[in-house]
């Protein structure tokens, strides 16, 4: 072998060994940073395995207010220990085609019913609770109970979660060189120590954390003002990382990955560096105008005006749109492509309206809805779908929990039942005659079958459901009580 070739081979070999050693070091380091917890707290998973690279993916993002460990400077252990409460709760929904992302915020003051949960470490069981703040869901049985609670509320089945603590915000904002935020007036919040001048400022470290944590600096000093500020911060962070080319800079991404993984708890299915890189790669090319920030519609709670409850029918419309994979920035756009249906499925499994039966007036047909699914939002979704399809003689029945969705019909209502099943997308095998039923009864089960209106039924959403997109530069309204002169 000529001397120059020997030298070239040696140099290439050294470089290759160096690259492999560098890669191995970072994989081991980042993998060692990761903390893991169970995705659920005892709920049954009905969906199949997820392909993290190409399937629609939903990740529940949580911010813990725990004062344990590195967060002890923000309070005593009496404030929050262990998992703590979820200071921030957002559902990130990535479309299958990687062209859009919806980020849905849940107010911490929202009153919900939590399911029975089991701590997956200790196996201690905790009963379900009624009318409690959603941020308490993970305080006893762990993060999985927060996931199960959001699943119960929305009718979704979340794929992954990420939980960060106070330190994550500080270090990430420092690593990217600060984030630009805007406020209408100079403000000072003595509780969070947030102090900002009027207009645009760059916040990082403690000030970035104070901006996200403050409960009083924005709007009327309530939770909804804080949510809009958090969404504005994330929008600005998204724009900065896109504009700076951060997502395409391997060195910067390693630095960010090191910061994030040191301050993050994730589920076992997400807890590998290749999987995290896959998720990051899916996000890097999304148009910022297709990153929609939404808050669950709420009103003051009847049981406590200082708390919130979901506003109907707007909340049910939002949850239905999420289940149907609707583009919230453009509800008329078709859903993202989904995997092809099983070719072995029987063509007769789905009912079709009868074309030969005599015409009848849908508005006169009695249709009752009984919700045994365990998902309260399903009632409004089904009623809305039926109304849109022309059935207006509707009612509701109390229902104990059941597993399987079915449609029952009385004598003379076979055709009506078939049309209702076709409208809702319920298989013909689930349409059954029943003695004692007058008209048609739609009994909703925990399998969450049905609920998709026919092709001619539009998706109804409140016109202002999207607070902003990541492409919008929004100036937050300061709380008049905290404006500083």
Image: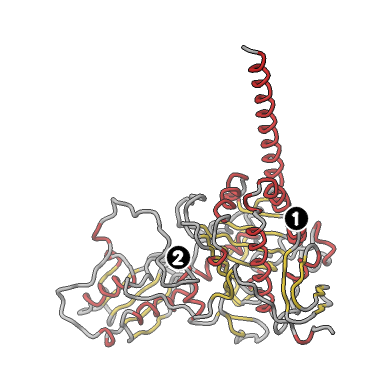
Foreground pick, 429 / 380: 380
Judging by the rendered image, the residue that carries numbered circle 1 is 175
Residue 406, percent across and down? 33, 69
Q: Is residue 417 above or below residue 203?
A: below
- Whether residues under marks 2 and 1 lie with C-beta atoms below 8 angstroms apart, the answer is no
Foreground pick, 435 / 192: 192
Count every numbered label the image shows and give the total: 2
Residue drawn at x 53%, y 57% is 159
In the rendered view of the protein, which quadrant contains the C terminus? Answer: bottom right
Callout 2: SS: loop
Residue drawn at x 48%, y 57% is 56
285 relative to 352 in the view: left or right: right
Of the numbered discs 2 and 1, the one sitting upstream in the chain is 1
Judging by the rendered image, the residue that carries numbered circle 2 is 325
Callout 1: SS: helix
378 relative to 239 in the view: left or right: left
Residue 411, percent across and down? 21, 79
Point out the frontmost of discs 2 and 1: 1
**CA distance separating discs 2 and 1:** 34 Å
């Amino acid at each position: 072998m000529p001397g120059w070739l020997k030298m070239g081979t040696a140099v290439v070999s050294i470089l290759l060994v160096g690259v492999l050693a560098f890669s191995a070091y970072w994989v081991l380091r980042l993998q060692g940073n990761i903390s893991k917890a169970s995705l659920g707290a005892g709920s049954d998973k009905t969906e199949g395995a997820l392909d993290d690279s190409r399937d629609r993916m939903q990740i529940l993002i949580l911010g813990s207010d725990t004062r344990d460990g590195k967060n002890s400077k923000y309070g005593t252990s009496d404030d929050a220990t262990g998992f703590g409460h979820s200071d921030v709760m957002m559902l990130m929904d990535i479309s299958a085609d990687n062209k859009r992302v919806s980020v849905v915020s849940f107010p911490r003051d929202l009153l919900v019913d939590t399911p029975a949960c089991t701590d997956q470490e200790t196996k201690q069981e905790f009963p379900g609770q009624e009318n409690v703040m959603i941020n308490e869901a993970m305080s006893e049985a762990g993060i999985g109970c927060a996931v199960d609670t959001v699943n119960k509320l929305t009718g979704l089945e979340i794929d992954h979660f990420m939980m960060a603590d106070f330190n994550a915000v500080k270090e990430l904002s420092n690593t990217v060189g600060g984030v630009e935020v805007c406020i209408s007036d100079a403000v000072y919040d003595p509780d969070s120590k947030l102090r900002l001048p009027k207009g645009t400022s760059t916040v990082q470290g403690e000030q970035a954390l104070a901006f996200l944590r403050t409960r009083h600096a924005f709007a009327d000093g309530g939770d909804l003002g804080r949510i809009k500020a958090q969404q504005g911060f994330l929008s600005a962070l998204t724009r900065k990382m896109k504009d700076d080319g951060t997502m395409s800079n391997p060195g910067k991404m390693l630095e960010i990955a090191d910061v994030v993984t040191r301050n993050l708890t994730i589920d076992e299915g997400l807890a590998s560096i290749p999987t995290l890189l896959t998720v990051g790669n899916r996000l890097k090319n999304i148009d910022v105008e297709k990153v929609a920030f939404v808050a669950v519609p709420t009103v003051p709670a009847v049981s406590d005006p200082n708390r919130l409850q979901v506003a109907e029918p707007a909340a049910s419309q939002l949850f239905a749109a999420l289940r149907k994979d609707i583009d919230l920035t453009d509800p008329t756009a078709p859903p993202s492509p989904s995997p092809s249906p099983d070719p072995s499925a029987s063509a007769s499994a789905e009912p079709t309206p009868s074309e030969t039966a005599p015409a009848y007036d849908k508005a006169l047909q009695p249709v009752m809805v009984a919700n045994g699914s365990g998902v309260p939002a399903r009632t409004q979704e089904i009623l809305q779908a039926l109304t849109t399809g022309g059935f207006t003689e509707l009612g509701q029945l109390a229902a104990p929990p059941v597993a399987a969705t079915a449609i029952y019909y009385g004598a003379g209502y076979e055709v009506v039942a078939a049309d209702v099943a076709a409208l809702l997308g319920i298989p013909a095998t689930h349409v059954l005659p029943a003695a004692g039923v007058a008209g048609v009864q739609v009994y909703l089960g925990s399998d969450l079958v049905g609920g998709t209106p026919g092709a001619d039924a539009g998706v109804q959403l409140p016109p202002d459901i999207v607070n902003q997109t990541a492409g919008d530069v929004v100036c937050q309204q300061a709380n008049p009580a905290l404006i500083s002169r």
